Image (tube, rainbow, N blue to C red):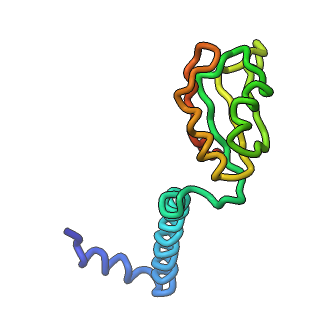
Amino acid sequence: MIDFTNLLAYFKGLSYFTVLIWMLIAVFLLVLNSHRVQRKYLHKIAAAVCGDMDDDSNVSLFVGNVDYKMSTKELQEIFSSYGKIDSVSIPVNRNTGRAKGYGFVTFVSSNDAKRALKVDGHEVNGRTLQVNFAKQTG
């Protein structure tokens, strides 16, 4: 429980202007924090409600369990039948130069990317591919 007698004694020593400033700062910080929280979850809420993204935006797929010897050209050939591809990449280890075992395929259309999810579970070069929408970073 708050002891209001001590609180009033504290405020008597301060000018009303100072108290008003501190109250405004407190309200501002509360509003700012709520906007940060809202902005943090706004993208997730919009994706759930709108069904991910607009059709005219590029959509990247994460392709896991890729053969370490697979080239970007081979990966593109696997996905090219599902639609127009903007880019394909297979990250490599900086120290060894060896592929990391996963890649990214970016489609021009989100509908094409959704159709390409059918590759999930297909076996290529003895490895079962794992295909999902890539998570946005940054």
Q: Residue at x 62, y 31 (%)?
A: 63
Q: Position of residue 53 (x, y in %)?
A: 61, 58
- 10 and 119: which is toward the camera: 119
Q: Position of residue 97 (x, y in %)?
A: 78, 15
Residue 138 shows in the view: no
Above or below 44: residue 30: below
- 22 and 103: which is toward the camera: 103
Q: Residue at x 23, y 71 (%)?
A: 2
Quadrant where the N terminus sits is: bottom left
Q: Position of residue 54 (x, y in %)?
A: 64, 61
Q: Position of residue 98 (x, y in %)?
A: 74, 15
Rendering quarter of residue 83:
top right
Above or below 27: residue 65: above
Residue 98 shows in the view: yes
Q: Residue at x 80, y 27 (%)?
A: 73
Q: What is the total number of numbered labels drawn onto the structure image?
A: 0
Residue 91 is left or right of residue 1, and the answer is: right
- 133 and 111: which is toward the camera: 111
Residue lying farthest to the front in this orientation: 81
Residue 90 is left or right of residue 45, and the answer is: right
